Image (cartoon, rainbow, N blue to C red):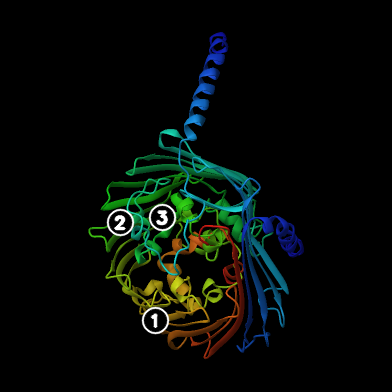
Amino acid sequence: MKKLLYHLLPALLLSAMPAAALADTSVDSTTIVRFFQDGRTGSTKDFVAPATEFLTLDADKLGDGKLSVHLYGWGRVDLADKSFNNNTFDGSITYAYANYRFDQANAQIRAGRFFVNEGIVNEQVDGLSARTDLPLGFGISAFGGATVHTAHMANESTDGKGDGIIGGRLNYRYKGMLELGVSGVYESDAPHLTSPANIALENEGKFGSHRLVGGDVWFSPHRVFDIMGHTSYNTETKAVAEHSYLLNVRPISNLVLTGEFNEYHNRDMFFSSILFASMVDRLNERSRSIGGRASYEFNKFFELSGDYKHYTRDIGQADRFGGDARLTLLDKTVRAGLGYHYLRSGANFALFPAPNASGSFHEARVYAMHDTKGYFSAIDAIGYFFKQNINGRPSAWEVIGSLGYHITPALALSGDISYGQNPQFVDELKGLIRLTYNMNYASKGGSK
Amino acid sequence: MKRFTMMFPILALAGLLVTIAACAQMKTLPSLPASHPEELAAGRVSCAECHEDQQKGTMKPFANFNHTTAFVKNHRFYASSDDRLCATCHKQAFCSDCHTNQVEMKPSIKYGYRPDREMPHRGDFLTIHKIEGKVDPSSCYRCHGRANNARCIACHR
């Protein structure tokens, strides 16, 4: 499969070139060569230098002007020792699809590999999808095809997904006040597992096929506030998997107040994931989080926000609170940010739960960046300061500096260097070189 | 059964007429533009700076989509029903920089020169995720749940 990808990616690109030359086209290429050395005891990797190419191609206005082709993928080759798994090469096509867009009713048809984000549905599919608005405020979308398989689970010859998938969403909109949606996804039967631990998951009703239905809502009786969210129901476990709702209030134009409520039923939510079903001990638990945020834009240059969230789980309760500030200056060429948060969590949230343990930590971050036509630079520092030492360390921090130069308006060469200390490494020094090419051949309209 | 056989052509005809009427009506329904007519400045945008009314395609006020910190933190709620509006300014790749199945490197490494994008898992998240995963495992599940990321599986067997 991997070999096929390496041949398929360039072949797709080459085949798209002639058509792309006639259309509004954008090409984004990022080549990153990283360098690092793992000096941990027992490490067999002396020097690692993976080179990764990320490629995005968007060709719009093909054919009668309504057809477009989109591709995004990456490939990696290790220039020195193997960087991660047993392969010297690796790669993936994230999406590759043709899209036909109609002039009316937001209608479109899509074919290939694509993502679906509709109501409660979040899937990656090899297949077909279609959507359109309908009269009287209705809208409909549907998709179907093959599931996109990922890495096999340890001790299994499967990723736990069925082979086929269908789904869609039906929605209704009433003026600018209300939107209601019902959506669902049906995946063919999950494969049977072979390792004893995973067989037990199946037998105990903790793992099975991926089948969900749900509803979503957006309601704004007055432009000052709106509420939106969704509830999903697992038809296999016959129970609600998730409630997730957000309230926005805008009492004045520069102030946004939000309130958020989430409730998750672990078994019903993680049912089709071997990884999570096997990892979370208390699958019958209801996790809940409730919180809020206030965000105020003093002017075009300065925004301040504060937030609080309370988590409730069977193993204990936790709170997170803090704030962020953002600064934008000199016609957006200088952007900076500052943030602080504290997670207060009990003994059971610690890395190694014990009566006197703590999972609490402070998080602080500051960054600044400057863009000009010639060069661009950024510095970013983030630190986690633990209430109790982890592996004998009181903190984990990292500073990343980045400097780049626009060789041409489309081509830029940049490099990052980072240094940090954390519970895994006494010193962690990393570097990379990045070559980016962002070309947009558009006849009109803004680049995306 | 005989009654159904008699009724079927009438029902089929009625259905056809409704479908034709609906299709004719659909030609009057507006579409969102394929792309924003003007190039936008770098950094976060405020839709309401230029647009005062409701968006035709979504019938929601533009002010809802101002890219405040609150919007960025909660963008999943908007993307699940209004991704067509997102697509007028953002390429699919913008979403896939973070939301993807098979990840080669942390997004914050790929975009080390764009700290303003607030890519997830900055710094030494390897240590922190052991706490965050217990505080809110569902937040991990949203991206990593069925992706079986090789780096997750390497330890979580």
Give the residue at x 74% y 57%.
A15
Q: Is A112 in front, or is A85?
A: A112
Q: Position of residue A58 (x, y in %)?
A: 61, 59
- For numbered disc 1, what is the local secondary structure? strand
The numbered mark, 1 or 2, whose residue comes first in the sequence reads: 2
Q: Residues within 10 Å of mark 3 (few under 14, many from 20)?
A: many
Q: Position of residue B42 (x, y in %)?
A: 45, 69
| CA–CA distance in space, label 1 to label 2 | 27 Å
Residue A296 lies, with reference to residue B50, above or below; the image says below
Q: Chain of mark 2?
A: A
- For numbered disc 3, what is the local secondary structure? helix
Q: Chain of mark 3?
A: B
Residue A235: tell me if it is visible: no
- Could you tell whether B50 is left or right of B4 in the image? left
Q: Which residue is mark 1?
A: A366
| CA–CA distance in space, label 1 to label 3 | 27 Å
Q: Quadrant of the image for the N terminus of chain A?
A: bottom right
The residue type indicated by label 2 comes to Asn
Give the residue at x 52% y 27%.
B19
Q: Position of residue A317 (x, y in %)?
A: 33, 67
The residue type indicated by label 3 comes to Phe
Quadrant of res B5: top right
- Label ID, residue A248: 2
Residue A363 lies, with reference to residue A232, above or below; the image says below
Q: Chain of mark 1?
A: A
The residue type indicated by label 1 comes to Val
Q: Which residue is mark 3?
A: B77
Asked if labels 1 and 3 share a chain, the reply is no
